[in-house]
Image (cartoon, grey):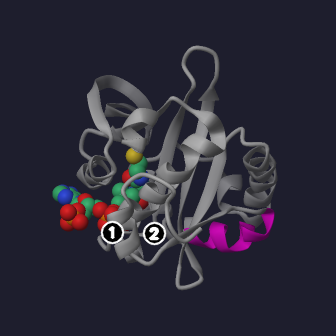
Amino acid sequence: MQAPAAGRSTYAAAVPVQLRPLAPSDAAELSALLVANREFLAASDPDRSEDYYTPAGQAQSLRAVAADHAARRRAAWGIVQNGALVGKVSVFDVERGPLQAARLGYWVSRHVNGRGIATAAVGLAVGEVFDLVGLHRLEAATLTTNVGSQRVLERNGFTAIGTAPSYLLVGGRWRDHVLWQLTEQDARG
Ligand SMILES: CC(C)(COP(=O)(O)OP(=O)(O)OC[C@H]1O[C@@H](n2cnc3c(N)ncnc32)[C@H](O)[C@@H]1OP(=O)(O)O)[C@@H](O)C(=O)NCCC(=O)NCCS
């Protein structure tokens, strides 16, 4: 994917990144990136099993993810720069019925932080996801202290809808998070 179908195309176009659906063949590259960023990601991620960091564990997870992506039940893209994976954007926990909502997650390898990659990648994902998965609303949650991630969401048109105390277990502690949303109408507007 080179350009978003909607969303914040200006920023995305200025930063040379692409998204591509992740496949089981990405497992070795992705797990190496996760191992290299283990400590960095642990500061904001829920705790992960040891399997999560292995090629075999990633291959197993990516098989399920790729099938769901193809069936438009969730989405997981690798963020690619100069042909190499530098991060991931995913849309998961899809709720149908009257909510039609899903959660957005993303990370970018620390060695390329601060170059606009997450902002561009989230813009590309937003441009695809409402059509791909068929959603009314995309949600995200950032640690109250994760200012960088909050900038990424703000720049992509997300609205902060409040602070949820004790929202997510990170590093063994229930941590407060700012909740964000982007409706389909916001994204297409
Ligand atoms: C958060 C994260 C995705 C940002 O990725 P990135 O590619 O560096 O993001 P961008 O370069 O697009 O934008 C980051 C912005 O936040 C700003 N920023 C980063 N840390 C900041 C801080 N501590 N205080 C203020 N601003 C900060 C950057 O300056 C930049 O803004 P600018 O372009 O206006 O200067 C990356 O750091 C990461 O993967 N962190 C760990 C996982 C994570 O937190 N994921 C999100 C979970 S909600």
* Residue in view at x 75 percent, y 66 percent: 55
* Residue in view at x 40 percent, y 62 percent: 118
Report the label total: 2
Crowd class of label 1 (few under 14; some 14 to 19; many from 20; radius 10 Å): some
Region rendered in magenta: 24-33
- Asked if the stretch drawn in magenta spans residue 26, the answer is yes
Q: Amino acid at mark 1?
A: Gly
Q: Is residue 24 left or right of residue 172?
A: right
Residue under circle 1? 116
x and y, in percent, of residue 64 in the image: 79, 47
Q: Is residue 83 left or right of residue 153?
A: right
Determine the main secondary structure of the stretch shown in magenta: helix
Q: Is residue 103 left or right of residue 159?
A: right
Q: Quadrant of ligand 1?
A: bottom left
Q: Amino acid at mark 2?
A: Ser
In the image, is residue 128 above or below residue 37? above
Q: Quadrant of the C terminus?
A: top left
Name the residue nearer the viewer: 156 or 160: 156
Q: Nearer the viewer, mark 1 or mark 2?
A: 1
Residue under circle 2? 109
Mark 2 residue's CB less than 8 Å from ligand 1: yes
As helix, strand or loop, the secondary structure at mark 1 comes to loop
In the image, is residue 144 above or below residue 31? above
* Residue in view at x 71 percent, y 63 percent: 54
* Residue in view at x 59 percent, y 68 percent: 1
